[in-house]
């Protein structure tokens, strides 16, 4: 996992930089519409984001190639509330060489890399991880 900051432009044209989210946990989730495990975890990420917007930022990076309208229709159909970025290898390379989808990268509230999860992740596991890191700091 690389430690450089990232800069992503979402589908609404907004630029997201790691430094913009100091004080919040940041999860960058790489996924694709054709990836069954990715689709399974999206409802948990939506629920997590909607419940903890003040403490957690989720950025979804769709690694679909081809027609971006497919991604946009999917985002609308799934009611994804967190920002979505249309990704590619160059965009992903800001964080890592993404070889498995889904892949999720965690940054702590200080903006430091905290963990990465290759494969499916759940809201419960994310909350448990954050609680354990918060308790260890006190």
Image: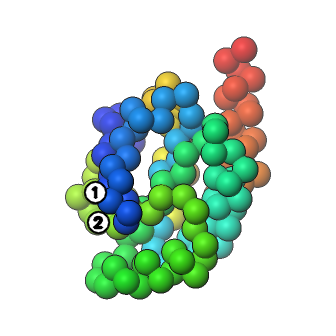
Q: Could you tell me which residue is drawn at 51 percent across and 64 percent down? A: 102
Q: In this image, 20 relative to 8: left or right?
A: right
Query: What is the quadrant of residue 76 in the picture?
Result: bottom right
Q: Could you tell me which residue is drawn at 31 percent across and 46 percent down? A: 7
From mark 2 to mark 1, how far is it between C-alphas?
Answer: 5 Å
- Do the residues bearing badges 2 and 1 touch, measured as CB atoms within 8 Å? yes
Q: Could you tell me which residue is drawn at 61 percent across and 67 percent down? A: 42
- The answer to whether residue 70 shows anywhere in this view is yes
Q: Farthest residue to the top: give it.
A: 138
Please rate how many residues cluster around mark 2, counting C-alpha atoms within 10 Å: few if below 14, some from 14 to 19, many from 20: some
Whether residue 26 is situated above or below residue 123 in the rendered picture? above
Whether residue 126 is situated above or below residue 91 in the rendered picture? above
Camera-side residue: 1 or 62? 62
The quadrant of the image that shows the N terminus is top left
Percent x, y of residue 22? 48, 29
Q: Farthest residue to the left: give it.
A: 90
Label 1: which secondary element:
helix
The quadrant of the image that shows the C terminus is top right
* The disc label shown at residue 91, or none: 1
Q: Could you tell me which residue is drawn at 67 percent across and 28 percent down? A: 133
Percent x, y of residue 80? 57, 68
- The answer to whether residue 92 shows anywhere in this view is no
Label 2: which secondary element:
loop
Percent x, y of residue 103? 49, 58
* The disc label shown at residue 88, or none: 2
Camera-side residue: 7 or 99? 7
Please rate how many residues cluster around mark 1, counting C-alpha atoms within 10 Å: few if below 14, some from 14 to 19, many from 20: some
Percent x, y of residue 109? 54, 29
């Amino acid at each position: 996992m690389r430690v450089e900051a990232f800069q992503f432009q979402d589908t609404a044209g907004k630029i997201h930089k790691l430094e913009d989210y100091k004080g919040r946990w940041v999860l960058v989730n790489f996924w694709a519409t054709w990836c069954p495990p990715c689709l399974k975890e999206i409802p948990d990420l939506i629920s997590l984001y909607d419940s903890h917007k003040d403490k957690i930022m989720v950025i979804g990076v769709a690694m679909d190639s081809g027609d971006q309208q497919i991604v946009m229709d999917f985002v609308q159909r799934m009611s994804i509330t967190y920002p979505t970025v249309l990704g590619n290898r160059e965009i992903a390379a800001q964080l890592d060489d993404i070889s498995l989808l889904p892949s999720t990268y965690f940054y702590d509230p200080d903006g430091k890399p905290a963990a990465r999860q290759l494969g499916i992740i759940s809201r419960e596991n994310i909350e448990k991880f954050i609680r354990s890191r918060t308790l260890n700091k006190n």
